[in-house]
């Protein structure tokens, strides 16, 4: 689905912000705060609908809770209450005859949706994710990420020990990336031929979008073993097996890939400055002179609340290794310290920015 131009997205978001602010003004402040405070409950409603696979069943047509519950093996009354709450958010609709039917939001929760948000909603309410969010106050007290404090190891090591959750995260990340990959791919003048290396590129969604635009390019996908196992079938489904090499490595130790363009998308925001520098220096040492590194991130200016980046910044604070969203100037500074020369920022039509640097 092509994204509308950036200016239109910004206008729609500004209008949405104004409408939400206006709605807040139409009720007393305690009610506005109460409404915001139960936002966590909304995440759990979505998580439960996604976990149970309700959207896949509603794709077959409207159904009441008894029918759905017998197919899902759950309690009919509790399911009715869950879906009634989901209807408040238009995640489903509830008809006067007691049957639920799908909405456009239900359709994006289907397993087979073009952009399926099912795994993201599951990931966001996994007990391991929630436990780290629960210690947000601890993160604010210490300035350190909650996940390692709560789970005793980095999120990536935790996923290594819990491959099912790691798979859910990888699929959630692929869904997030599928929303902006076409726009990011369209925002950069990729070479007609040569090699693009996506460093910590997950299951390959971003790389696939770039290769779809340039038939003469080859790709190298770098990540940890379990994630690359998931990447194989995905790239195969896109007909890219012959054009993409999978390279398992630790981005802190060595990225043994010679390429013309290197990509780091949504990777630096997982880490603190010191770890980012280690990653950037590792990549820099693999880069031939004159090759380019494109850092793709949401930008967060220090004094500008942002609809998405400001909450994702807290997601990084709680879930990752002292990660954070950064401004373009902060990213450029890290690139310079790693021996790269930043050469400007391109904004893609979605929420992403591309910070371009040359070795
Ligand atoms: C937030 S995800 C971003 C994935 C992808 N770039 C995207 O935007 O969809 C971060 C990725 O870093 C990978 N990763 C984390 N630590 C790593 C390490 N030490 N070496 C290689 N990859 C690593 C994870 O497996 C994960 O795929």
Image (cartoon, grey):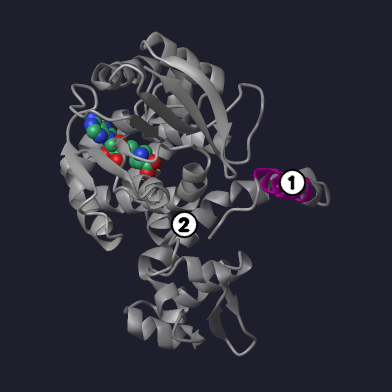
> Under tag 1, what secondary structure?
helix
Residue 346 or residue 37, whichever sits in front: 346
> Under tag 2, what secondary structure?
helix
Q: Is residue 318 magenta?
A: no
Q: Is residue 293 above or below residue 193?
A: above
**Residue 122 visible, this angle:** yes
Give the crowd class for mark 1: few <14, some 14-19, many >=20 residues within 10 Å.
few
| Residue 282 placement: quadrant | top left
As drawn, which residue projects farthest toward the bottom?
Answer: 97
Residue 250 or residue 294, whichever sits in front: 294
Does 20 sit left or right of 59 as displayed?
Answer: right
Q: Residue at x 48, y 24 (%)?
A: 140
Q: Residue at x 18, y 46 (%)?
A: 226
Residue 44's disc is: 2
Q: Please tell me which of labels 2 and 1 falls first in the chain.
A: 1
The stretch of residues the image draws in magenta is 6-20
**Residue 131 visible, this angle:** no
Mark 2 vs 1: CB contact within 8 A: no
Q: Is residue 272 above or below residue 305?
A: above
Instruction: Quickly name the residue at label 1.
Output: 11
Q: Is residue 19 magenta?
A: yes
């Amino acid at each position: 689905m092509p994204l509308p131009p950036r200016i239109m997205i910004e206008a729609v978001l500004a209008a949405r912000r104004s409408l939400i602010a206006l709605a807040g003004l139409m009720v007393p402040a305690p009610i506005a705060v109460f409404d915001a405070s139960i936002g966590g409950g909304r995440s759990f409603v979505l998580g439960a609908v996604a976990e149970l696979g309700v959207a896949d069943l509603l794709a077959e047509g409207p159904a009441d809770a008894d029918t759905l519950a017998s197919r899902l093996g759950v309690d009919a009354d509790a399911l009715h209450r869950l879906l009634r709450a989901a209807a408040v958010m238009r995640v489903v609709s509830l008809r006067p005859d007691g049957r639920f039917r799908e909405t456009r939001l239900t359709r994006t929760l289907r397993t087979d949706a073009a952009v399926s948000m099912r795994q993201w909603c599951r990931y966001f309410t996994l007990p391991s994710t929630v436990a780290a969010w629960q210690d947000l106050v601890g993160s604010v007290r210490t300035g350190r990420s909650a996940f390692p404090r709560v789970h005793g190891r980095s999120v990536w090591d935790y996923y290594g020990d819990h491959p099912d959750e790691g798979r859910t995260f990888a699929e959630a990340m692929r869904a997030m990336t599928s929303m902006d990959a076409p726009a990011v791919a369209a925002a950069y003048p990729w070479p007609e031929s040569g090699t693009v290396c996506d460093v910590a590129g997950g299951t390959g969604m971003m790389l696939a979008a770039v290769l779809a635009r340039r038939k003469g390019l080859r790709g190298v996908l770098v990540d940890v073993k379990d994630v690359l196992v998931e990447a194989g079938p995905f790239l195969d489904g896109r007909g890219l097996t012959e054009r993409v090499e999978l390279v398992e490595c630790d981005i802190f130790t060595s990225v043994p890939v010679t390429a013309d363009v290197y990509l780091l998308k949504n990777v630096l925001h997982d880490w603190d400055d010191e770890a980012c520098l280690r990653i950037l220096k590792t990549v820099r040492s693999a880069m031939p002179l004159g090759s380019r590194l494109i850092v793709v991130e949401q930008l967060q200016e220090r004094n500008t609340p942002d609809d998405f980046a400001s909450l994702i910044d807290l997601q990084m604070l709680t879930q990752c290794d002292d990660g954070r969203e950064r401004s373009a100037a902060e990213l450029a500074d890290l690139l310079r310290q790693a021996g790269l020369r930043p050469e400007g920022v391109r904004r893609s039509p979605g929420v992403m920015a591309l910070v371009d640097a040359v070795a």
